[in-house]
């Protein structure tokens, strides 16, 4: 089944359009990753309006490649400027920046790119080997399992998000409510449809562009330093860095495994996996390696982990249709617009799409290695771009991209409205990711909940009668209970600390 | 006046309360009229949004209670906050962008886009007119080329029907 | 004679092209096909035809899936778009004829200009292959009549054509069963295959791809070709009683339509492109692989095909009402 889907996927993958778009995606991803404040999620969001008009596998190749490039690009500014371009690269500066200080900037960037690509390939292997197995297991899932799985996805993202558990759950609930706008599949009635363009609900792309991109630009404008132009020396890494990286093969394998595993867990994501694998690598290193003072191993650990996470995160995304973090949620949104549902049926009925996505993911990592190393001077030059030019360009892209979706002015106002909501939520310390996950998982949750109740002959017991569903119910209860427990403990510890140090 | 995180939190609370109220209002009026606000899961489209809204309302209440408790235990405001005038720039950015979106359809892409770009660059602190006007025009033209010539998207022409036949 | 006129019109249209490109350069951008159901086999069929038509026109033609309200939402969205030929509506029977008959929509088929008939897509009632509770359809119906409200079935969306047809069949046997709506066909098929649902509607495409998963109980068409497509399963022609479903075949057709105010010269461009696309043997072969057969009905057969269906559908609309009432009594 696996070989078959890869072979069938080959047709979809091996087209000039797909290859070019995947490579362009990597380049664009590296650029948005390198630019502080943007990142893989923003890159995917900004290109989403254009991708949804392309053939499915080409579009997914483009978007996934942005994620892959974006997960690596942040290391460039972390190493050269001590400013991580994305939170994913925050742990890379521990050793990357000292390396650059010692005059090894080119090696550090070369290692970061090589480790990213190799970690990404490892993540791809995990994806290809586990996603079909998981999809096969899930092919027996019925509405109760899907309803509970949707809840698990939503709760775990709320638990792990920045800000408090309560705030995460609240924005998640808001997302679920937004998802109910439009036509109800069951009663065939309309809900909250105040305008005929709301019959289908708000366009997911307009929501995502507004909530992430517009609010991010407002934040950048408020943060100031819009005309800062860092001085960076040109850096030119070579393919020798691949060998430097491979010398740390044990570390590479270990960190990639951590990254892929963390990626597959809902809610965890790349940033946590980089810190975890850095900590493990440091603990297992010899003192003479000098972690924190410019050890190659430190860069290998963090960068291989964050790109392996991308592959790992795609496992539940493709096999179950449950996103683990915001970028996967946006990818699912794209898949739905492109006309296919991620989940077991994708592997059974459209193996060529699943196989094509595997292949574009692998190719994007190969492309990352080549393009990344050859084009590093370009990405370093990009760091000199002033935000005073970047912000207007990003906003223009938001406007025209949203308009391009269906030539609708209404969509523009939806985007703007969600931009303002995003600004408010950010200012109040509310995480944005649960909202988007809520919008994506909302229909899955509601429809499967109601379907379960219709199918059931004894009401809510259907969720406990079926073993997998019962396990998921237990997991959800446990997740909430442990999150509440930890929140309270953390609060108490904070209060105790504050009481000790009266300032 | 200093703007603190708590002020934004109050605004978000208001937003949530408004949403919860809207859900119940719609369920009682519009959905009831359509006959989809009662019955079992097959016909009742209001039960689920009402349940989520009730949950959200409960969380808002819990949050308010916690906020009051914290205020009484005198933990003080959590962050130093920012002065009100520091928010002028982002507010202006939002205003310029909204103005752009509003005038895009009536005035057309080619008339409004360079103006919006230039206004944002000015807002961002660029003062050299050449460094504003040249990039604004080039970016606007470059984008319209990519969209219209490559992606075959017709940008709004406005009342003058300004469209460049690339 | 008609053939000659068509040829003449085409020839005229072709010679007029160099002139027309200056005055009326159509199409210049993406043309959207508004599709009334969720992604799945039927959408793949429409996408296939849209791609072939896009090749004829030289612009891309994305299929926009806007499921909801038994397909009427797609119609409302399409009717609110400008009548400039850049929006084509995939007109299935349910939203085009059935919903207006039921009083759920305020248009008639006259409010649209036909481009060409698209495809026909027969369907059947089936159970999971592992379900051996009933030997044939009539046994299943007898069980159902004795246990009202106990059986669960799906027709994809609620109030769509298969739902209506199946409701009519069930009503004839006094069988009250609970319909379970699904947005994506694949989910419903998965639950049917796994035995979560007792029976359901199965279209030709699904049967040809995953036929082993199902036991076909009844093909809902009198056409011998339809029964053949379902492995010669029993059809309504083999039943002793009349379900009132005769004469409607082929049931699952769709026409591609545009807003009635669309400029005639643009309609002509689209018609010729669609006719060429449906006639392309390569495209027809691909469609057949998906379980679709393109229909050769021309735009001037629209009234003749669509007109009489309205009356016949009325009876089936009543079956839906009957089902709702019976379910609410339980």
Image (cartoon, rainbow, N blue to C red):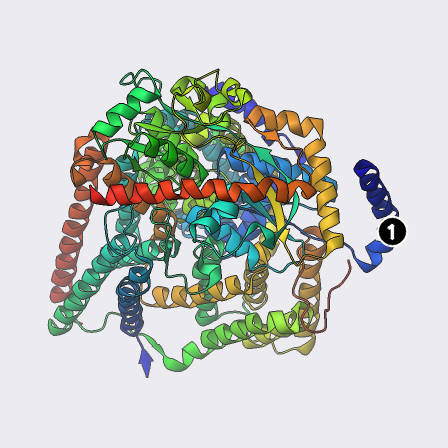
State the image coordinates of residue A115 (x, y, percent, origin top left). 48, 36
Q: Quadrant of the N terminus of chain C?
A: top right
Q: Residue at x 62, y 60 (%)?
A: C82
Q: Position of residue C288 (x, y in %)?
A: 60, 25
- Tell me which corner region of the image, top left, top right, bottom left or bottom right, holds residue C83: bottom right
Where disc 1 sits, the SS reads: helix
Given the current orientation, which residue lies at the most extreme bottom position?
B1
Q: Which residue is mark 1?
A: C18
Residue A99 can be seen in this image: no
Across and down, in percent, residue C248 comes to 52, 33
**Residue pictured at 84% horizontal, 38% vertical:** C4
Which of the two residues, B24 or C232, is positioned nearer the viewer here?
Answer: C232
A146 vs B102: above or below: above
Picture quadrant of residue C14? top right
In the visual, does A85 lie left or right of A501?
right
- The residue sitting at 24% across, 45% down in the picture is C328
Location of residue A169 with respect to A293 vertically, above or below = below
Q: Is residue B17 above or below residue C230?
A: below
| Left or right, residue B140 beside residue B64 | right
Residue C322 or A139: which is nearer the viewer?
Answer: C322
Compared across the picture, whether A328 is left or right of C280 comes to left
Marks counted in the figure total 1
Residue B55: give x, y in percent of width and height.
21, 57
Res B22 seen here:
yes
Query: Nearest the camera: A377 or B72?
Result: B72
**Identity of the residue furthest to the front in this view:** C241
Give neighbour class at mark 1: few <14, some 14-19, many 20+ (Cα, 10 Å): few
In front of the other: A344 or B113: A344
**Where's the C terminus of chain C, which quadrant?**
top left
């Amino acid at each position: 089944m696996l070989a078959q889907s890869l072979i069938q996927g080959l047709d979809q993958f091996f087209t000039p359009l797909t290859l070019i778009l995947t490579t362009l995606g990597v380049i664009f991803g590296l650029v948005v990753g390198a630019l502080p404040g943007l990142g893989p999620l923003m890159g995917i969001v900004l290109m989403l309006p254009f991708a949804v008009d392309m053939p499915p596998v080409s579009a997914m190749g483009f978007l996934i490649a942005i994620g892959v490039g974006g997960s690596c690009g942040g290391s460039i500014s972390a190493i050269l400027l001590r400013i991580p371009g994305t939170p994913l690269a925050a742990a890379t500066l521990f050793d990357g920046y000292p390396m650059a200080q010692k005059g090894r900037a080119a090696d550090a960037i070369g290692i970061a790119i090589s480790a990213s690509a190799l970690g990404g390939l490892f993540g791809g292997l995990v994806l290809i080997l586990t996603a079909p197995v998981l999809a096969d297991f899930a092919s027996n899932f019925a509405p109760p399992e899907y309803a509970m799985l949707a809840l698990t996805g939503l709760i775990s993202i709320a638990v792990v998000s920045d800000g408090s558990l309560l705030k995460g759950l609240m924005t998640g609930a808001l997302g679920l409510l937004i998802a109910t706008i439009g036509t109800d599949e069951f009663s065939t009635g309309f809900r909250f449809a105040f305008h005929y363009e709301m019959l289908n609900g708000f366009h997911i792309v307009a929501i995502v562009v507004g909530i992430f991109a517009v609010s991010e630009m407002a934040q950048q404008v408020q943060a100031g330093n819009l005309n800062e132009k860092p001085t960076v020396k040109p850096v030119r890494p070579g393919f020798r860095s691949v060998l430097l990286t491979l010398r740390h093969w044990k570390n590479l394998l270990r960190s990639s495994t951590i990254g892929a595993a963390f990626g597959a867990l809902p809610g965890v994501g790349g940033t946590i996996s980089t810190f975890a694998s850095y900590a493990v690598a440091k603990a297992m290193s010899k003192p003479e390696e000098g972690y924190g003072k410019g050890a190659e191993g430190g860069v290998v650990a963090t960068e291989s982990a964050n790109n392996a996470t991308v592959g790992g995160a795609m496992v539940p995304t493709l096999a179950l249709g449950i996103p683990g973090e915001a970028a996967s949620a946006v990818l699912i949104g794209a898949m739905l617009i492109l006309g296919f549902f991620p989940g077991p049926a994708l592997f059974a009925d459209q193996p060529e799409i699943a196989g094509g996505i595997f292949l574009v993911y692998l190719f994007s990592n190969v492309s990352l290695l080549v393009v990344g190393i050859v084009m590093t001077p370009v990405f370093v030059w990009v760091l000199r771009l002033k935000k005073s030019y970047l912000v207007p360009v990003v906003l223009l892209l938001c406007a025209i991209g949203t308009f391009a979706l269906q030539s609708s002015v209404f969509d523009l106002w939806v985007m703007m409205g969600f931009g303002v909501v995003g600004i408010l939520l950010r200012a109040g310390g509310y995480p944005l990711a649960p909202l988007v996950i809520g919008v994506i998982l909302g229909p899955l949750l509601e429809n499967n909940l109601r379907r379960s109740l219709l199918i059931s002959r004894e009401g809510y017991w259907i969720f406990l009668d079926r073993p997998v569903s019962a396990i998921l119910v237990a997991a959800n209860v446990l997740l909430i209970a442990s999150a509440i427990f930890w929140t309270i403990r953390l609060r108490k510890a904070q209060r105790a600390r504050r009481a000790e140090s009266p300032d | 006046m200093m703007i603190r995180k708590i002020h934004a939190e109050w605004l978000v609370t208001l937003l949530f309360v408004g949403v919860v109220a809207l859900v119940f209002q719609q369920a009682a009026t519009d959905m009831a009229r359509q006959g989809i606000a009662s019955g079992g899961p097959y016909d009742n489209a209001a039960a689920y949004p009402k349940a989520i809204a009730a949950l959200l309302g409960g969380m808002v209440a819990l949050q308010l209670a916690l906020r009051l408790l914290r205020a009484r235990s005198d933990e003080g405001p959590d962050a130093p906050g920012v002065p009100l005038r520091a928010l002028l720039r982002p507010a202006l950015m939002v205003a310029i962008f909204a103005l752009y979106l509003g005038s895009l359809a009536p005035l057309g892409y080619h008339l409004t886009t360079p103006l919006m770009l230039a206004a944002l660059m000015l807002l961002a602190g660029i003062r050299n007119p050449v460094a504003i006007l040249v990039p604004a025009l080039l970016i606007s033209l470059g984008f319209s080329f990519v969209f219209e010539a490559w992606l075959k998207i017709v940008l709004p022409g406005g009342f003058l029907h300004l469209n460049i036949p690339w | 004679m008609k053939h000659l006129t068509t040829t003449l019109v085409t020839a005229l249209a072709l010679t007029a092209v160099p002139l027309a490109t200056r005055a009326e350069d159509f199409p210049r951008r993406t043309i959207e096909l508004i599709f009334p159901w969720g992604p799945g086999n039927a959408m793949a069929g429409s996408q296939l035809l849209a791609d072939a038509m896009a090749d004829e026109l030289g612009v891309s033609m994305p299929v926009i899936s806007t499921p909801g309200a038994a397909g009427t939402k797609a119609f409302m969205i399409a009717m609110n778009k400008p009548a400039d030929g850049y929006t084509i509506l995939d007109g299935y029977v349910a939203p085009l004829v059935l919903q207006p008959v039921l009083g759920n929509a305020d248009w008639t088929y006259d409010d649209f200009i036909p481009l060409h008939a698209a495809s026909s897509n027969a369907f059947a009632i089936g159970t999971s292959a592992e379900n051996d509770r009933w030997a044939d359809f009539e046994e299943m119906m007898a069980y159902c009549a004795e246990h009202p409200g106990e059986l669960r079935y799906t027709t994809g969306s609620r109030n769509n054509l298969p739902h209506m047809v199946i409701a009519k069949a069930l009503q004839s046997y006094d069988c009250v069963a609970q319909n379970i709506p699904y947005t994506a066909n694949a989910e419903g098929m998965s639950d049917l295959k796994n035995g979560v649902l007792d029976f359901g509607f199965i279209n030709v495409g699904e049967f040809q791809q995953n036929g082993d998963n199902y036991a076909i109980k009844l093909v809902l068409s009198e056409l011998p070709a339809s029964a053949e497509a379902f492995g010669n399963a029993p059809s309504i022609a083999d039943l002793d009683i009349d379900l009132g479903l005769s004469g409607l075949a082929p049931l699952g057709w769709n026409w591609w339509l545009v807003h009635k105010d669309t400029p005639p010269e643009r309609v002509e461009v689209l018609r010729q492109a669609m006719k060429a696309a449906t006639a392309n043997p390569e495209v027809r072969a691909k469609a057949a692989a998906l379980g679709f057969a393109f229909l050769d009905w021309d735009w001037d057969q629209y009234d003749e095909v669509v007109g009489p269906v309205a009356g016949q559908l009325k009876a089936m609309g009543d079956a839906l009402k009957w089902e709702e009432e019976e379910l609410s009594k339980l």
